[in-house]
């Protein structure tokens, strides 16, 4: 019904690319006298995956709903400084700190969602705007690192089950919850419907703003979770930690790399996780090979474009003939009539 | 939303259980270090009030005194000079043979760091030839705290490192990483920005941000009248080595009734020129203060284009500023955040494995370039690109000068 | 064909910009977001003059106009891409590339100025062609393509130059962005960047009145209909990307003159340009807006920053104000564009999905695939 075949094959390709990246990565790593699958290396990949993972899961939902979220890095930073400030090294403050950080995240998401749906502002501009608002607030009120995380909270980062960091498990837990939400709940189905074609969704009697707002709220909340995780890792809140990671554009790139359509309506979380993992593997291998940091950006840029070009071509080739090549540019009037 | 929250709560519950019973060996060292920092941090959190976050009078006084301190060692090799103080006994590390060094670099994203990294690479060549160091593995965090922590952890578990060199991306956030490196029992050398632990074998840095602020603000105050307007161009907020420069300068400007207004530029010359042009539009500007000289030329050109007199100005020992300073003949000072400190970490590693004691806190000289000394530095660095720093201190290293000229 | 055109044009009868006489257009235009930005510019200008009397000096004004020219030119370039329904995020990276190219290729050699300019234009055009062809022929969303070009170009330039250019190019070349016609009465100086801006603006207006411009808007408005009418989408969109990269190149030439060589010149220009375009009432997703409004949007943005400075607002709060303003401006213009369209409930998510229309976006909802 939801184009399952298409989704499956698309995700299959993503995982094939991931497998390829792992194999090539393992060979290159071995050529440098290292073991790709060693505990330390896997740990390195997983810890770098989990932060971007949280954000990319949320970004997937927002993109599925036909919007975008460029404000995530600032929500990450905000959650990290607010959380760190409230905790102030006292284990008794962990619960309120987490609650407040998540609430702030949700509030930003709510604002994003309402601006997009009620004020009819394009998601790109709406979230660019809220991101700037938060960025100004952070720069004006937080000079340098702020607050501190108590030891109990830092265990969130330090604890591992076997080679797997607890943060990665939480990330996977959130991913499973999001997958269930998309597959099993009405909200999930509506999100696909609105993202695929808002007009059709509206004519079918959906309240189109609801899923879009919900996606934004979840996305910003997950960004806040990522911020808290970074707080646990860094032990202090940092007002620029989100921008340092470039999570806005990298999360969008990971989502699209994972086979989700940037225009919305099609894609899934599993693909996104693979997209994030592909970036993590590439970064890891480039790190082992000590590739010039500037050259790494070149590799990232080329990988993004080439990988997405592969999916995009496949999607078009698999299309029934009556969807002519140029016609795919058009999403809505086709069904309206 | 609710589902995700529920998921998060469920996972959190699992976490609490796991954390309670986890007896991983990974947990051990974290326990020890975490409790240590916690106590430190709580002490810290009470201390800084909002305005004085970057101004600690004791540090200011200390650096003020260090400006005129006597440095041990040969003046011809300032990168090995230090202020007399507590030394670390390194006899436990004494070992023969070439050692492998792992270097976790914050980034090479500005000309100062690029110049320094070239110097470090050439120093490595020299030490390889001397048989002291076999190899240096570098991981570059591209200005990201999270990446640098992962880099350090990677080195600890996979790097087969004999010693660690860390140039922290930020002070507080990198503390846990440096502590984990210390826990390996191998020598750890920290340089440039500091961390909130003294576990490192040696912490190498020039005198510091307050000294920069004192040198520059004193110079401007001496050359300006009370009430004169000074534009302070700052790169970005929240970086301690930059914030302390401004904190000290702001204090001195206030004391001398200099009317200083600060702006953030992101080191973008377009932004710098706009700020100066707008300020000139508002009224007369007598002085320009910079917390780093990158982009100084654009600031000077803004005065040229507006057709007004040159300001009294402090830039940095970057070649672009020194050249423009000479061309225009303005009254200026080139403060220095000693770029030659990039040589010191590898030399420190050599000393450590030779069992020689090293300063616990290795304070390097930091002397501004005055107008009288300018010609000498311009001549010595002739042919270097604009983004080169005059006090890079690599004249005697292999590959000089090509390695610095062809970037 | 007829079905589609009627559905769309009757729904948006006020799309006036490029038909009718000049006078009629100005009159009707002021009521549209694309016209309102000129009012905004005027209001901001008066506010600045009140808060800082020095700004009333014609010389100061014209210098302000001169230094805003690079942003306005970049915004006009971004306009072509946005109005055809795409994004160009590579703009800042293109500017940085050209700035470094000018520093390293031209250097202090007088004789290399002309070859240098030609080289920069060729490189600019080439980047545009690559962006355009990957977007149109390989069907990769332009957001992703230009994000990729942005990363690749920035990295490549820094890798090749080791992060820093050798030095500023020769002064004669920098005069293009720094100098002007001297000793003009009243204003004292007419900056070259302003002259270049005016020339490019005139050319842009002319271009948008040509079949190319009309088709470009039509493509952004309704690619399917335009496709039926036989216009080759890939060719039009690729040309839009080329125009965008060339504009970035010109902005780069002006900026290297204005500010000098530095890898951070041009940083963030893509977002500034998109913001300016959107402030000018141009609809993200394409099909609406006037090219001069994009340039006016750039002026409004710069005036806003100057106003904040002269009001003594701390520079750290600048982002916040900018964020609020662009949300408000777009919210207002989203309303305004809807006046006369379908009565209520015009769904914004439709606009959103039209934001990246090269996506084959039917898969999950139609059940056709």
Image (cartoon, coloured by chain):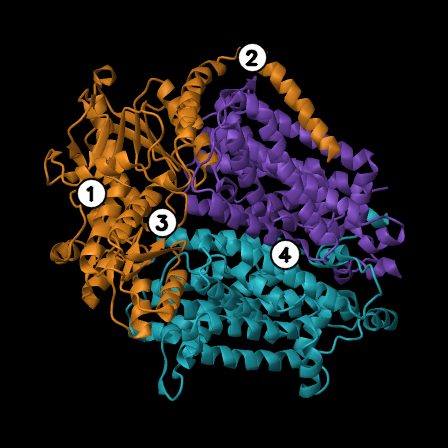
Chain identifier of the purple chain: A
Q: Residue at x 71, y 55 (%)?
A: C359
Report if the CB atoms under discs 1 and 2 are less than 8 Å apart: no
Give me the C-alpha separation between circle 3 and circle 4. 30 Å
Percent coordinates x, y for residue C265 in the rendering: 42, 60
Label ID, residue B22: 2
Name the N-terminal-most of marks 1 and 2: 2
Report if the CB atoms under discs 3 and 4 are less than 8 Å apart: no
User: Label 1: how many residues lie within 10 Å, few (<14), some (14-19) or many (20+)?
Assistant: many
Image: C7 above or below A20: below
Residue B399 in the figure: left or right of residue C364? left
User: Label 2: how many residues lie within 10 Å, few (<14), some (14-19) or many (20+)?
Assistant: some
Q: Residue at x 28, y 69 (%)?
A: C108
Tag nearer the camera, 1 or 3: 1
What count of labels does the image hold? 4
User: Considering the numbered disc 3 on the image, is that residue within a helix, a strand or a loop?
Assistant: loop
Chain where mark 1 sits: B
Tag nearer the camera, 2 or 3: 2
Chain where mark 3 sits: B
Label 1 sits on residue? B366
Label 3 sits on residue? B110
* Residue B313 visible within the image: yes
Label ID, residue A125: 4
Q: Are marks 1 and 2 on the same chain?
A: yes
Q: Residue at x 58, y 12 (%)?
A: B20
Residue B257 in the figure: left or right of residue A141? left
Give me the C-alpha separation between circle 4 and circle 2. 46 Å
Report if the CB atoms under discs 2 and 3 are less than 8 Å apart: no
Chain identifier of the cyan chain: C
Q: Residue A97 appears in which quarter of the rendering?
A: top right
């Amino acid at each position: 019904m939801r184009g399952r075949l298409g989704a499956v094959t698309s995700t299959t390709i993503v995982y094939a690319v991931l497998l390829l990246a792992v194999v090539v990565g393992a060979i290159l790593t071995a050529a440098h006298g290292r073991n790709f699958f060693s505990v330390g290396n896997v740990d390195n990949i997983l810890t770098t995956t989990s932060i971007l993972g949280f954000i990319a899961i949320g970004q997937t939902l927002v993109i599925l709903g036909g919007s975008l979220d460029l404000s995530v890095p600032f929500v990450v930073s905000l959650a990290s400084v607010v959380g760190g400030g409230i905790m102030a090294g006292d284990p008794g403050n962990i619960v309120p700190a987490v609650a407040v950080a998540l609430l702030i995240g949700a509030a930003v998401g709510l604002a994003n969602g309402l601006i997009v749906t009620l004020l009819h502002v394009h998601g790109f501009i709406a979230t660019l705007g809220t991101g700037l608002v938060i960025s100004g607030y952070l720069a004006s009120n937080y000079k340098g690192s702020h607050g501190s995380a108590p030891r109990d909270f830092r265990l969130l980062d330090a604890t591992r089950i076997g080679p797997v960091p607890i943060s990665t498990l939480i990330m996977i837990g959130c991913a499973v919850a999001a997958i269930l939400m998309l597959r099993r709940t009405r909200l999930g189905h509506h999100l696909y419907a609105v993202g695929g074609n808002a007009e059709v969704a509206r004519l079918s009697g959906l309240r189109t703003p609801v899923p879009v707002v919900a996606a934004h709220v979840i996305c910003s909340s997950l960004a806040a979770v990522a911020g808290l995780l970074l707080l646990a890792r860094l032990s202090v809140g940092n007002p620029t930690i989100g921008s340092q990671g470039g999570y806005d554009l990298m999360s969008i790139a990971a989502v699209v790399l994972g086979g989700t359509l940037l225009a919305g309506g099609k894609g899934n979380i599993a693909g996104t996780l693979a997209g994030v993992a592909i970036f993590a593997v590439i970064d890891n291998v480039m790190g082992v090979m000590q590739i010039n940091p500037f050259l790494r950006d070149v590799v990232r840029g080329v990988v993004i474009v080439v990988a997405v070009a592969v999916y995009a071509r496949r999607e078009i080739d698999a299309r029934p003939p009556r969807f002519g090549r140029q016609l795919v540019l058009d999403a809505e009037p086709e069904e309206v009539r | 939303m609710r589902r995700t929250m529920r998921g998060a709560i469920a996972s959190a519950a699992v976490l609490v259980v796991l954390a309670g019973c986890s007896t991983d060996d990974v947990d051990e060292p974290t326990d020890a270090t975490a409790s240590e920092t916690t106590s430190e941090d709580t002490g810290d959190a009470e201390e800084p009030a909002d305005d004085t976050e970057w101004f600690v009078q004791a540090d200011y006084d200390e650096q003020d005194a260090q400006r005129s301190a006597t440095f041990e060692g040969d003046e011809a090799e300032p990168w090995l000079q230090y202020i007399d103080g507590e030394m670390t006994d390194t006899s436990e590390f004494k070992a023969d043979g070439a050692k492998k060094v792992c270097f976790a670099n914050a980034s090479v994203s500005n000309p100062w760091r690029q110049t320094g990294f070239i110097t470090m690479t050439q120093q490595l060549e020299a030490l390889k030839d001397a048989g002291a160091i076999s190899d240096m593995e570098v991981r570059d965090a591209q200005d990201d705290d999270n990446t640098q922590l992962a880099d350090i952890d990677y080195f600890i578990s996979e790097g087969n490192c004999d010693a660690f060199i860390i140039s922290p991306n930020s002070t507080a956030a990198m503390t846990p990483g440096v502590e984990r490196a210390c826990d390996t029992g191998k020598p750890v050398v920290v340089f440039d920005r500091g961390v909130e632990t003294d576990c490192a074998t040696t912490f190498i840095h020039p005198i510091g941000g307050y000294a920069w602020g004192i040198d520059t603000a004193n110079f401007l105050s001496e050359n300006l009248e009370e009430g004169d307007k000074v534009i302070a161009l700052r790169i970005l907020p929240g970086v301690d080595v930059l914030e302390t420069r401004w904190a000290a300068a702001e204090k001195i400007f206030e004391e001398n009734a200099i009317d200083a207004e600060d702006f953030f530029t992101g080191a973008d010359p377009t932004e710098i020129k706009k700020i100066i042009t707008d300020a000139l539009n508002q009224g007369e500007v007598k002085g320009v203060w910079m917390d780093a000289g990158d982009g100084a030329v654009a600031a000077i050109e803004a005065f040229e284009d507006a057709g007004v007199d040159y300001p009294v100005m402090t830039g940095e020992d970057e070649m672009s500023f020194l050249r423009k300073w000479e061309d225009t003949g303005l009254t200026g000072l080139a403060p220095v955040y000693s770029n030659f400190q990039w040589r010191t970490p590898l030399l420190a590693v050599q000393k450590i494995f030779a069992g020689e004691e090293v300063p616990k806190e290795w304070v390097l000289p930091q002397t501004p370039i005055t107008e009288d000394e300018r010609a000498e530095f311009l001549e010595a660095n002739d042919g270097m690109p604009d983004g080169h720093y005059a006090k890079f201190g690599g004249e005697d290293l292999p590959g000089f000068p090509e390695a610095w000229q062809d970037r | 064909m007829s079905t589609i055109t009627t559905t769309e044009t009757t729904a948006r009868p006020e799309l006036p910009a490029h038909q009718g006489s000049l006078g009629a257009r100005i009159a009707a235009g002021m009521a549209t977001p694309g016209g309102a930005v000129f009012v905004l510019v005027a209001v901001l200008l008066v506010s600045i003059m009140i808060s800082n009397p020095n700004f009333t000096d014609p010389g100061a004004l014209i210098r302000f106009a001169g230094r805003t020219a690079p942003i306005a030119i970049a915004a006009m370039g971004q306009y072509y891409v946005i109005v055809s329904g795409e994004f160009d995020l590579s703009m800042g990276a293109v500017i940085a590339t050209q700035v470094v190219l000018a520093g390293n290729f031209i250097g202090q050699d007088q004789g290399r100025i002309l070859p240098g300019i030609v080289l920069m234009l060729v490189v600019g055009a080439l980047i545009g062609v690559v962006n355009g062809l990957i977007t149109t022929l390989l069907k990769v969303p332009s957001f992703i393509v230009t994000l990729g070009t942005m990363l690749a170009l920035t990295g490549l330039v820094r890798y090749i130059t080791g992060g820093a250019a050798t030095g500023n190019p020769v002064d004669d070349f920098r005069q293009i962005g720094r100098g002007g016609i001297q000793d003009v009465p009243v204003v004292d100086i007419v900056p070259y960047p302003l002259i270049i801006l005016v020339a490019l603006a005139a050319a842009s207006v002319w271009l948008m009145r040509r079949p190319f411009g009309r088709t470009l808007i039509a493509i952004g408005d309704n690619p399917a209909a335009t496709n039926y009418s036989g216009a080759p989408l890939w060719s039009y969109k690729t040309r839009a990307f080329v125009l965008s990269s060339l504009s970035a190149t010109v902005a780069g030439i002006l900026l290297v003159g204005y500010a000098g060589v530095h890898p951070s010149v041009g940083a963030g220009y893509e977002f500034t340009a998109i913001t300016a375009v959107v402030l000018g009432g141009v609809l993200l997703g394409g099909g609406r807006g006037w090219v001069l409004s994009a340039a006016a949007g750039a002026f409004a943005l710069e005036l806003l920053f100057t106003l904040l400075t002269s009001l003594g607002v701390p520079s750290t709060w600048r982002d916040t104000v900018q964020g609020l303003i662009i949300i408000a401006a777009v919210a207002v213009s989203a309303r305004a564009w809807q006046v006369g369209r379908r009565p209520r409930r015009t769904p914004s998510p439709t606009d959103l999905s039209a934001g990246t229309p090269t996506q084959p976006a039917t898969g999950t909802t139609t059940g056709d695939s």
